[in-house]
Image: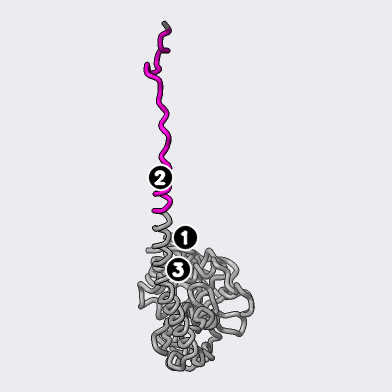
Amino acid sequence: MSQSRRGLPKTPSVSVQSDRRFRRADGIGRRRRYGRTAWRALRWAPPSLCLVAAITWLGATALHSDLLRIRRLVIRGHVHLSTGEVEKLVDGIRSTNLLQADLAAYRRRLRHSPWVADARLSRVLPATVTIDITERVPMAIARLGEQLFLMDVSGSIIDEYGPRHQQFDLPVVDGLVVAPRSDSSPAPAERVQLTAAVITALDGRADLRRHVSQMDVTNPRDAAVMFDDDPAWLHLGDTRFLERLQQYIDLRPSLRDRFRDIDYVDLRFGERVFLRGPGRSGRASAAAP
């Protein structure tokens, strides 16, 4: 008597034929679902097409409507540029549809003005564009030969200095501009930084700043300044500007008693100052009290 193989059932397996009726029922169900989905899509297609057509028509109408043609400009933030000058920089914008106006291109045109550091343009329905101007702030009057230029803290030339700029009480700086105005980088960065450092320090001493009439930054490690009531050049180095100016003010009475004429005073060496008078090739020194 043969024994069953271990792991196999003792009773012979019975094959069960699949019922084809179940498969027919699944196919019919799927077809019905597809049909309902298609019917819903067909039912909503006409309204959807009408909505798309309406939106397209409204968009085309808006793009050609006179109601959205730019008629008003609101200009803010300009001080040195007149309203007319700003409008001239965006000439042509008034004849443009508000939705089609290339505001980025007009912003680039505004930034081509040397007075404009940045500009922001915004649309306001139905027919207004606001223009917010950020103007450059003059830092100094840079001198190159016989020419004078207004320059900002970035070293950019704003305008040629003239009678219309008399309201700016700024020092005249030599050595700041080393190239013609057409040059893309007329001022070396280290000289611009030295000038800005001196002027920033003087902002904390208004009594000193209003008397500093000239500056020379030809040597980017030594700022030389001159008071409006004193012909001597004061060499301050590249740090401790206020401390060294105050040192000279304290010493000036005794220096004037000892030296009638002084060309320059070098204040870069701590408690000792070195000075030179006209026509002298040597140097004299004076100890600080």
Task: Report the residue that reaches farthest toward the top.
Answer: 1
Asked whether the beta carbons under mark 2 and mark 3 sit within 8 Å of each other, the answer is no
Disc number lying in front (1 or 3): 3
Closer to the N terminus: mark 1 or mark 3?
3
Within-10-Å neighbours for mark 1: few <14, some 14–19, many 20+: few
Q: Amino acid at mark 3?
A: Ala
Q: Is 223 positioned to the left or the right of 240 in the image?
A: right
Judging by the rendered image, the residue that carries numbered circle 3 is 197
Which region shows up in magenta? Answer: 2-29
In this view, 9 is above or below 287: above
| Residue 11 part of the magenta-drawn span | yes
Q: Amino acid at mark 1?
A: Phe
> Of 98 and 272, which appears nearest the observer?
98
Q: Main secondary structure of the magenta part?
A: loop
Judging by the rendered image, the residue that carries numbered circle 1 is 269
Disc number lying in front (2 or 1): 2
Q: Amino acid at mark 2?
A: Arg
Residue 29 is at least partly visible in this image:
yes
Q: Secondary structure at mark 1?
A: strand
